[in-house]
Image (cartoon, rainbow, N blue to C red):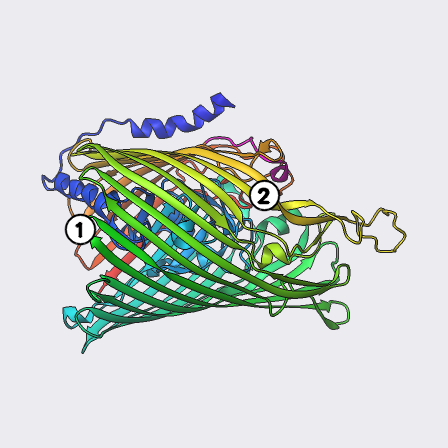
Amino acid sequence: MTGLCCRHLIPVLALSALTLSAGSDPNASKLVEMDLMALSEIPIVSAARHQQNRGDSPRAVSVITAKEIRRRNFRNIPEAVAGLTGVFLQQTNYAGGSPIIRGMVGNRLLLMLNGIRLNNATFRLGPNQYLNFIDIHQVERIEIVRGTGSVLYGSDAFGGVINIITKAAPDPRLGQEFGGRLQVRYGSADQSGSGHVEFSGSSHGLGFLGGVTREGFGDLRVGRGGMEPYSAYSQWSGDVELQYALGPERTLSAGLMRLRQSGVERSDLLKSGSDLAYEWNPEGRDLAYVQYAQSKVNRYIDALQITTAYQRPIEYLTRIVASDPNTRRYHEDEVMSGNLMVQFTSSLRSSQLLTYGLEVNSDQVTSRRTDVQLATGVARAARGNYPDGSGFRTISLFVQDEVDFSKRLHGVFGARQDWFRIAAELADTVVGKVKVDSAPGALTGSAYWLYDLTPKLSAVFGIAQGFRAPNLDDSTIVGGSGGRYEIPNPSLTPERSTNFEYGLRVKAKRGKASVVYFDDHYRGLMDRAPALLNGLPFVDSNGNKVKDPKEMDVYQRQNIGRASVRGVEAEGMMTPSPGWTWTSTATWTHGSDDSLSAPLSRIPPLQGESRITWQPGRNFWVEGVGLAATDQHRISPGDRADVRIGPSGTAGFAVFHIRAGISRTVLAGASIAWENLTNRRYRLHGSGIDRPGMGVVVGYTRAF
């Protein structure tokens, strides 16, 4: 295995080690050095809940901007974040994409849009598709805080926080302006086409921004001439934002967003034959928000921000399971979520900044199912995926204190208290009527330090607690699947973690680099465990108290798991010669299920990406990209039974792309990419679908 792993990494390492020299525009090196500085000084908000330079935060943060997204023509948000330091992508189907950060996936990562939490009471424990419910054309930048963010953002921020910052309407205080943008994209591997049109302007104290996107994707052609059936789908979205200047220090903003996907099929289950039909049509999200922001409130409060939001994610699923081929099941799941956030910022003195506030979140679930007999057309109502009318509510208080102890030592300390309420009633033919009414709570704290050892070398250290409260998917799940019958557990308590982080950062005139080592320990993880129903470990359907061949064993989710995850995240950027830029990332993760003395599920392999860019002037650039991952044969017992992974794990790979772009004016630009040059057939670990084979991606942008 070791030799094979090394063989896959050699091409990327060789690409990284190339000696580069070429004649170029004398301004090119200045442009690249400006980009290097801009990258380290890019403003971020997610690490501290207020704007700061990325290099001033002790947290490990990955960022990608709209400029980089347009330049590389990414298909969607999951694929845009996949190449960032410390981020791995899992794809159950082509319309999805679930990031894995520090071994955590699904509802153990917190998704946010402009600081509004997207996670709700029905987010699943494993991989999910919800990151692709946001149009990539709306993005201004994406910030990923790697490591627990529970103190600032509450439940689900176990492995990290992904905050998507969308484009803002023009500030009306800057004068009158009007404009727009047209973006088109074509991909040959999936015969995809997309178009986006947006308009913006400001006048008479009001700024506005609006856009519409339409996209279609065919079945994916993968490497070596293969095809991925059940991968075609279509998508449309629209958004509008208004910004009204109430005065020089006060702003009122409002936004509305909608996205719908149609014809989305579950590739892995259909290919395995366990389902004859499995299609979401439609699925998506509606979101509306209003935000009031004021600076210089009074002598005690520097800034105030109040945000209210309403969201409605929907999933309409049609399914025919192979074990019941005569019945078509129609699932309709909707979550109505209300969010309120109030945040204050106060300077206690010139070297100390306090950020504090409260959050209130409320989810109400509507879940229905209708079974239709295909032979007769007779329909009957059945129990949905979740108890219809169930609710999940949270109230949270948080505080963060940032202190400059000296010019070289900076500390960030925080604490948070959360209260939860889960309320649901369900009826099942096997377990009868069950009432879930629990009110768990969680208190967490964190401390991070950033110390400048020299003007060019800094050290970071952090210790933080994390938690994830049980949601409705954890507490109320009931039904038979895979030879077992799960019953609800009203007594679940939050999962908890203690996370340690150590890092070094180096910056110089021609480059910068950082390395982070993390060591995370989890306890009380929710996992399936054998349980009793009416005093028996199996479903006694005939009442004879003897386990018959078709009677299923009883399982229940319980707080039994213990796990540890450690790893290294490294990134570097340098300008080896004028006009050239080299960037590289590498991530290694090792996860153990300490309860079973076995590997932890869905741990990514050693992976890395290296990119060399030549930009001789302002109007042209070309780059070569190499990405690689080693084999992953260290898998959990559950992974071996997963059709997306299998008993042998996932093979490693090395893939290469070439991209180029040109902009004749500041208003128009085009890019082209030749991807997967060797037409390799490969799959990201844990995925149910292969990645695209050799193909061309073309994009064009025109501002007006």
Q: Residue furthest right?
A: 544
Please, is residue 255 above or below residue 38 in the view? below
Left or right relative to 25: residue 610: right
Horizontal and vertical percent position of residue 226: 53, 43
Q: Which of the pair 570/295 is nearer the observer?
A: 295
Q: Quadrant of residue 235?
A: bottom left
Q: Of the numbered discs in the image, which one, if any, rests on residue 555?
A: none
Horizontal and vertical percent position of residue 637: 63, 36
Q: Which secondary structure is most common in the magenta stretch? A: loop
Which residue sits at x=19%, y=39%?
406
Crowd rating for badge 1 (residues with CA inside 10 Å; few <14, some 14–19, many 20+):
few
Q: Three-letter amino acid code at disc 2?
A: Arg
The CA span between labels 1 and 2 is 54 Å
Say what secondary structure mark 1 lies in: loop
Please, is residue 421 above or below residue 155 in the view? below
Horizontal and vertical percent position of residue 221: 49, 47
The range drawn in magenta is 630-640
Horizontal and vertical percent position of residue 307: 35, 67
Report the residue marked by disc 1.
350
Left or right relative to 196: residue 131: right
Q: Residue furthest left?
A: 26
Say what secondary structure mark 2 lies in: loop
Report the residue marked by disc 2.
644
Q: Which of the pair 80/215 is nearer the observer?
A: 80
Q: Three-letter amino acid code at disc 1?
A: Ser
Q: Earlier in the sequence, mark 1 or mark 2?
A: 1
Tell me the quarter of the image containing the C terminus.
bottom left
Which residue sits at x=38%, y=53%?
152
Label 1 vs label 2, nearer the camera: 1
